[in-house]
Image: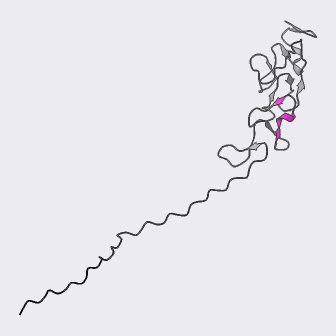
Amino acid sequence: PPPSPPPSLPPSSPPPPSLPLSPPPPSPPPPAHPPPLPPPCPTGRSSREGTASCDICEEKYYFEPFTGDCELCNTLIGIDCPAEGTTVASMKIKPGHWRASERTKTTYACKQRNSNRWTPCLGSRNTSQGRRLAGSEQGVLCADGYGGPKCEVCVQDQYYFAERDAR
């Protein structure tokens, strides 16, 4: 007998899908929401870097201890608040003005002498020459040779005349 035909092979089919060797990575967590921003500070107040409390007065404001508020400096005569964190004690006294102590925000205008409007009241910015207010940390208030209220007292055997000073 003639040889029989080889058995027919089934039609080729795709190989079975391969199974993963490990489970798929977990889905990333949903995006985190940033923490809510702190409420803005009241006018004149600021927070120090890294803090949320409004615990410092901004530049041009000073801390008023009786109310606990930050008050505008430009409402005071002869006073300047050039830096944040200014207190009554650290206020800068403008040239031509004088104050009795670091515990008061009241200043007094000093007399101007000569036609060039010179005054012995240097203010608290000038630290070159002069006399400190007794017990003061705020800097020089009076020109050398002057002291006392509104820098109107001669010190160290110097003399004062109405329109000029003599040394």
Residue 103 falls in image quadrant:
top right
Q: Can residue 64 be seen in this view?
A: no
Report the residue that reaches farthest toward the left: 1
Whether 99 is among the magenta residues is no
| 80 w.r.t. 140: above or below | below
Question: Against 20, is 50 above or below?
Answer: above
Say which residue appears at 90% left-offset and 25% top-offset.
Answer: 108
Q: In this view, does 33 lie to the left or right of 74?
A: left
Residue sitting nearer the eye, 157 or 39? 39
- Front-lying residue, 18 or 43: 18
Indicate whether residue 73 is drawn in magenta.
Answer: yes
**Vertical position of residue 22 compared to residue 97: above or below:** below
Residue 25 in picture, x, y percent from top left: 43, 66
Whether residue 4 sits left or right of residue 64 in the image: it is left
Asked if residue 59 can be seen in this view, the reply is yes
User: Where in the figure is residue 72, as x and y percent of width and height?
Assistant: 83, 38
Residue range (magenta): 70-79
Q: Specify whether 77 is left or right of 20.
A: right
Residue 155's spot in the image, x, y percent?
Answer: 85, 13
Q: Which of 131 and 22 is in front in this view?
A: 22
Query: What percent of the width, then of the height, locates residue 35?
Result: 64, 56
Residue 143's quadrant in the figure?
top right
